[in-house]
Image (spheres, rainbow, N blue to C red):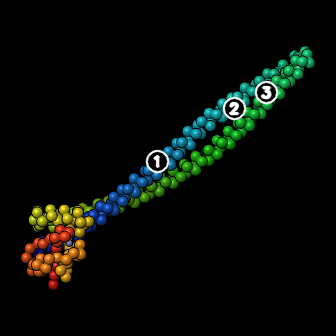
Amino acid sequence: MHEQMNLLKELQEIDQEISTIEKSQQGYRQELDSFGVESARVQAMLDELSAELAVLQKDEAQLQQDLLRERDNIARVEGRLPEIQTQKEYVAVLKEIDMAKKANKDLDEQLLAKLQEISSLEEDLQEKEAELAGINEKAEARTAEINELLAESDTALEKRKETRESVTKDLPTALLRKYQTLFKRRGGLALALASNGACLGCNMQLPPQQFNSLLRETEMQTCPHCNRLLYVEQG
Ligand SMILES: [Zn+2]
């Protein structure tokens, strides 16, 4: 019983280490996932800005076209001036030219506003592109670090599992199974020290008879309250 308890203590220590390593690996993997999420978030913003820019550029092309047509229009109407015969006709053509020039000016203003919008959007786009590049660069560097850490902890884990194997092979199957169930259910603490008549796993008093037989170390005992496997301080 003494021998088995020592093996169980060793096993619990190994299992706690394994669980710590596995938790840190989980953390590393979550960090890796978070890079993808962050990068995708900024990429989505970039896509949105690019789509907006495409719309603005289409508007701009349309305005340029309208402007060309309006200029042609002015030239065409002005070309008619030398052939004018009457004062009435002359006034009408001048009015037409005036209206065309106003339309032209209006289009010019619209185009200018559109170009400013485009330039401001392009600045936003560049900013986001820089942000994305920064995120990706950082993620790349940290990913390399994390992969190294994961590889290191994989090696550590492998070693622990080998040691675990050598410890468990000397333990009876039923006892091992009981220990494993307790380890899972009792937050990684399957064994409890019994001291001054109490179980230190749950801090409850043990029946005096049980505590006495525990001191004699005759058989494996479990706490009637928390079910943990009990041991006493030796020596
Ligand atoms: Zn207990």
State how far apart marks 1 and 2 are (Cα).
36 Å
Assign a secondary structure to mark 1: helix
Q: Quadrant of residue 157?
A: bottom left
User: Does residue 183 appear in this view?
Assistant: yes
Who's the residue at 90% across and 18% down the image?
88
Who's the residue at 62% across and 47% down the image?
123
Using residue 225 as the reference point, say whether residue 52 is left or right of it. right
Who's the residue at 69% across and 31% down the image?
64
Which amino acid type is marked by label 3? Ala
Q: Extreme left residue here? A: 218
Who's the residue at 10% across and 78% down the image?
209
State how far apart marks 2 and 3 are (Cα).
15 Å
Locate ligand 1 by image quadrant: bottom left
Is 154 above or below relative to 205? above
Using residue 62 as the reference point, say whether residue 74 is left or right of it. right
Residue where numbered disc 3 is placed: 100
Residue where numbered disc 1 is placed: 40
Using residue 131 as the reference point, say whether residue 64 is left or right of it. right
User: Does residue 144 appear in this view?
Assistant: no
Which amino acid type is marked by label 2? Gln
Q: How many marks?
A: 3
Residue where numbered disc 2 is placed: 64
Q: Residues within 10 Å of mark 2 (few under 14, many from 20)?
A: some
Using residue 110 as the reference point, say whether residue 95 is left or right of it. right
Instruction: Report the quarter where the C terminus lies.
Output: bottom left
Q: Residues within 10 Å of mark 3 (few under 14, many from 20)?
A: some
Which amino acid type is marked by label 1? Ala
